[in-house]
Image (spheres, rainbow, N blue to C red):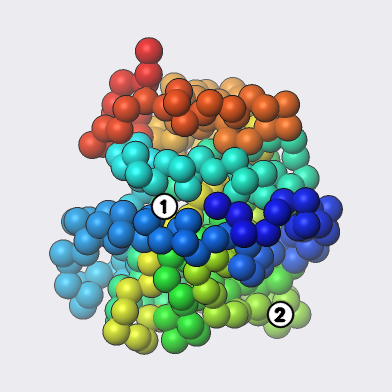
């Protein structure tokens, strides 16, 4: 999967960059040929999504930003080698400066041709996790020029509360932009090519422009959480929902370690054989399916 050997990637520098900026761009790190088969799978997930059938004019700002299908690994075995790539997870762990990471969930984020902008927001608003060691790998499966809405980041915003209490939408976008410190934090936006990835922390504010092209922006994201992290008391309805869906059966204080959060990489090799241990693909997501065994 990796085009650049891990040893050549200067992982210590990666952790320092993420600590400073809240995100990192890793151009050309993945092999485009190895990624090619995953594109059709993500396109299929988006095309068959009920969200895609709602006319653009009838959607909210959030819904116009992308068709979002979550935890595809549960349904689509073909995606598992990407979501459970130990190389990607190793990068995520290095960026977080931790010894191991687990899956929180994955997402198809397909910004359709003519789709709207992704409002500025931070992800951890939605997550009942008692840690800041969370990171998202944003993996484009098509080239994403500026006109298609590549991801953009507010550099250093993981250290500033620009609007952590606001869900994604017009309100989060406005709250972030009117924050007195917004102008101090540089916006980093760059086109992306297949093989590039970005990594961003759960508290980093980010967004994307609209898709002004006639092609869909096909992206998969994988969200990792540090091994050993604990479940927090949910403070919003979104967090209560996330706890039920991604952390079934847990109470605040439990380790994030349900059957939906397997270890994807750990320095002691605990991740080895993870693909073989996963439950058979099932049509539903979240805890509605019986756990393995
Ligand atoms: O792809 C986008 O437009 C937004 C992605 C995002 O918000 C995320 O990966 O956390």
Left or right position of 71 against 12: left
Q: Which of the 4 quarters of the picture holds residue 165?
A: bottom right
Q: Are marks 1 and 2 in contact (CB under 8 Å)?
A: no
The residue wearing badge 1 is 107
- Label drawn at residue 186: 2
Whether the residue carrying mark 1 lies under 8 Å from ligand 1 is answered with: yes
Q: Is mark 2 within 8 Å of ligand 1?
A: no
Instruction: Farthest residue to the top: give it.
Output: 293
Residue 190: % across, % down: 59, 80
Percent x, y for residue 243?
Answer: 46, 35
Q: Residue at x 29, y 84 (%)?
A: 214
Q: Secondary structure at mark 1?
A: strand
Decide if residue 191 is in sight here: yes
User: Crowding near pointer 1: few (<14 within 10 Å), some, many (20+)?
Assistant: many
* Residue drawn at x 73%, y 76% as measured from the top left: 185
Q: Earlier in the sequence, mark 1 or mark 2?
A: 1
């Amino acid at each position: 999967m990796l085009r650049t050997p891990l040893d050549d990637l200067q992982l210590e520098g990666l952790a320092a960059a993420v600590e400073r900026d809240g995100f990192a761009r890793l151009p050309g790190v993945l092999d485009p040929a190895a990624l090619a088969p995953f594109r059709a799978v993500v396109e299929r997930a988006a095309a068959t999504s009920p969200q895609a059938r709602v006319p653009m004019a009838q959607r909210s700002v959030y819904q116009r930003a992308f068709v979002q299908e979550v935890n595809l690994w549960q349904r689509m075995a073909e995606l598992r080698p990407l979501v459970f790539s130990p190389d990607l997870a190793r990068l995520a762990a290095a960026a977080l400066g931790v010894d191991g990471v687990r899956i929180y969930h994955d997402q198809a984020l397909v910004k359709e041709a003519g789709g709207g902008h992704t409002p500025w927001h931070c992800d951890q608003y939605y997550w009942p996790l008692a840690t800041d060691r969370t990171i998202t790998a944003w993996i484009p499966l098509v080239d994403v020029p500026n006109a298609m809405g590549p991801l953009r980041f507010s550099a250093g915003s993981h250290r500033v509360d620009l609007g952590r209490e606001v869900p994604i939408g017009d309100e989060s976008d406005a709250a972030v932009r009117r924050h007195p410190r917004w102008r101090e934090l540089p916006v980093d936006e760059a086109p992306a090519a297949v093989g590039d990835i970005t990594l961003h922390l759960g508290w980093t504010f980010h967004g994307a422009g609209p898709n002004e092209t006639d092609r869909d922006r096909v992206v998969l994201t994988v969200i990792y959480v540090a091994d050993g992290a604990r479940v927090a008391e949910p403070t919003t309805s979104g967090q209560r929902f996330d706890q039920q869906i991604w952390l079934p059966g847990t109470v605040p204080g439990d380790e994030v370690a349900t059957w939906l959060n397997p270890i994807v990489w750990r320095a002691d090799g605990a991740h080895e054989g993870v693909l073989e241990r996963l439950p058979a693909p099932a049509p539903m997501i979240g805890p509605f399916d019986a756990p393995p065994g």
